[in-house]
Image (spheres, coloured by chain):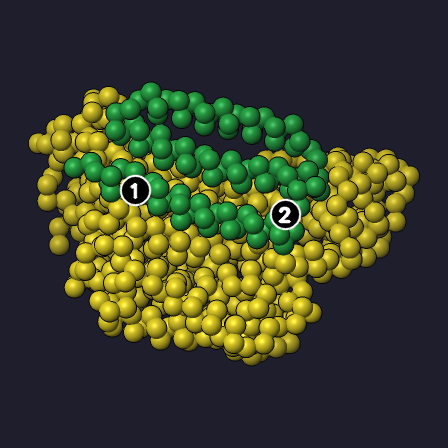
Amino acid sequence: MEAAIQTSTSFWVIIFGYFTLVLGFGAFFARYNRTTQDFFFSGRRFSWWLVTMSIVATGVGSHSFLKYSSKAYEHGFSSTMTYMNDWFFMPMFLFGWLPIVYYTKIRSIPDYFERRFNSGVRALATIAILGYMIGYIAIGFLTMGKTLEPLLGLDLYVIIFIVAIISGIYITFGGQTAVIFTDLAQGFILIFAGIIVFLLGINYVGGFSIFWNALSPEFKLPLAHFNQPSNFNFVGIFWQDGVAGSVGFLFMNQGLIMRFMACKSVHEGRKAAAFNVLVLLPISTIVVSNAGWVGKAISIVTPEAWNTATKLDHVFTQVAYLITGSEVVFAFVIAAVAAALMSTVDTLINAVAAVVINDIYRPLVKGKDDKHYLRVAMIVSAGATVLGAVSTIFFDNFPTLYEAHGFFHSTMTPPLVVAIFLGIFWKRYNTPAAIATFLGGAILMWVGSKYPQIFISPFDHGIEFNPDRPYSYIRALYNTLVCAGSGVLVGLLTSRPSEKQLEGLTVWSLDKAREFFKGSLPNDRIGEKVEVEWVVKESTEDTVEFSINDMEVMAADMGDLVYLSDKRKWLGGLKSIHSIYGEPHTEDGKVYINQTHVDSAMFDPKIKLRAEKEL
Amino acid sequence: MLDFSRTWLPFIYLYGVGGGIFIIGMIIILRARSIKLERPRHKEWFHILVFGMLYYMGIHSLFTFAALGKTLFAGLIGLAIVLLSAHLILTLMKKLNRTA
């Protein structure tokens, strides 16, 4: 097979140089992984801005540049729909699921199901979530293969094999801290790369007004036609992506949940999530879609420059090649996109390892030391990589990545999404109801996919029936309703769980969750942060001692939880610890900490610490 | 052909159904006292949540008007979004050093 786009050696030198730099960056921060807690959750220490930038690389990289460029080229600005419909669920996420996950200190989403229901439901949730994440990894690998296909001219599966090996090596040795830091760098770089493509593209067509006027009003509308065509319509995509996809990504994506759990507090997690949806998603949607809009403008303004035989999934690569004008810039753009895709895959591989270790292996093989579990986590990471690469065969059958992803969301997310939602918000939802959601829902979903014209068509909102791919998107509505219906029906017909059983596990008892997290009643008095010098004490007790006056400024009492970090804000909490306020002293501006604190946070002797009360 | 199904019906459906989901979410977290309006930090979050909804409605309506060539409406909505955002950012910046 011959490469559709010709490249020279310097192109590949830049690509490999970029990857080496990113991998080196991650490896440097991997030294902060000392336990499985660090490997998976980074010790709950990071600031919101660091986490939110790393989320960009995960979210954008997952399905984006190729998938949205192709739909943007075909359908215009409505390709942004999927990034612009996440706010509806933010109240439930910020003040429901996020604090529950954080305060209950669950290790994985199935862990929540065991605490809320029982081990049987946990097993069902584990199967569902592993299927979801392996599918996501497969789509990531497939996207990566399709990005590089026109450049390498190699067989798609050979490319996937190479990419899988690189990803596997990186995540196996890096862990979550390495992923967060490489994602942070890549988050900035890929937004920069996407904006460069947009600016160069506008310049290529002759300026913004030529670009804007070349596109039809229909092309520029931000939402698609209500129910036409069957492969891209507003209502189907609303239910598939706005509901199943958004909730799936926010509530059941173990990789994303682990990012929020790496935040130093729930408040920081909320800031990370809100900033991501309000600021970074609108920017990201332009970043990932603009190549398609520019491609359409080029095909209208300078049709002789546009290769009409370009496959839809190759629109991004084709546009980047046309407009960059320099191989160095083109190589940078491709490297940034490829690295972003890698971020998504790496996050998910790490998440699969977390689920397998915490939900399958640890309950079976108890009593081993942490190093043992860390070793097994690395082996599982490698296994997840292989499984993800093999699963690409299934998704390659769809006409475009967008449709593959849409089908995947519509089918995989509803049972888990419904179980999580009803579990958090409906106190009456019990174990038989949760089992009914998974099993009854799965059976009814299968019946619906077998006889779509009977079962799904009542919900089709007028979308045309396509016999080859019946109701790819709107099936999400049917699937969600049957899963919810099964759970609600059984919940109403069986006895409600006791209040004691639900303490701290639903939105109705979050105060209890905070109390369990702290070990005593939370202290919500308003205080301020203080800067202090640190001194190492002899004791090994996990307490830190401040002066009486500093405690007053922080509005803290003995036994409250405290967060101490290097005062340099740009470190984002990398050098930090959580501890408990001990007996106060009288030396203002000084804190006594023990050697374990110093070793764990790698505090610099010359740098002051910033302290704040947590709870 | 720019008929109603292509222009405003998706917008109405998005903020009708999506808005319903948002309001239900707000009611639940208020009734569950997961968000407590007497706590200053939570009150700020309440405002941010409402702002986010208006912000997205603003962006979608701005681009719909702009695509239809109604630049005056689009400009006014854009201005409102900028003013609301600036107000929110300035308010939050004043309270950066506070905890709890």
* Residue at which label 1 appears: B9
Report how far apart the C-alphas of labels 2 and 1 lie in the structure.
33 Å
Residue A127 falls in image quadrant: bottom left
Tell me the amino acid under the disc marked 2.
Ile
- Indicate the secondary structure of the residue bearing disc 2: loop
Q: Are marks 2 and 1 on the same chain?
A: yes
Where A241 sits versus A447, above or below?
A: above
Tell me the amino acid under the disc marked 1.
Leu
Q: Position of residue A17 (x, y in %)?
A: 36, 42
- What is the display colour for chain A? yellow
Residue A204 falls in image quadrant: top left
Q: Residue at x 63, y 54 (%)?
A: B32
Q: Residue at x 57, y 47 (%)?
A: A269
| Chain ID of residue with mark 2 | B
Q: Is residue B92 left or right of residue A466?
A: right
* Chain displayed in green: B
Give the foreground label among 2 and 1.
1
Q: Mark 2 or mark 1: which comes first in sequence?
A: 1
* Residue at which label 2 appears: B35
Q: Position of residue B7 (x, y in %)?
A: 26, 37
Q: Is residue A172 left or right of residue A471?
A: right
* Quadrant position of the N terminus of chain A in the picture: bottom left
Residue A48 falls in image quadrant: top right
Q: Position of residue A605 (x, y in %)?
A: 73, 40
From this viewpoint, is residue A387 visible? yes
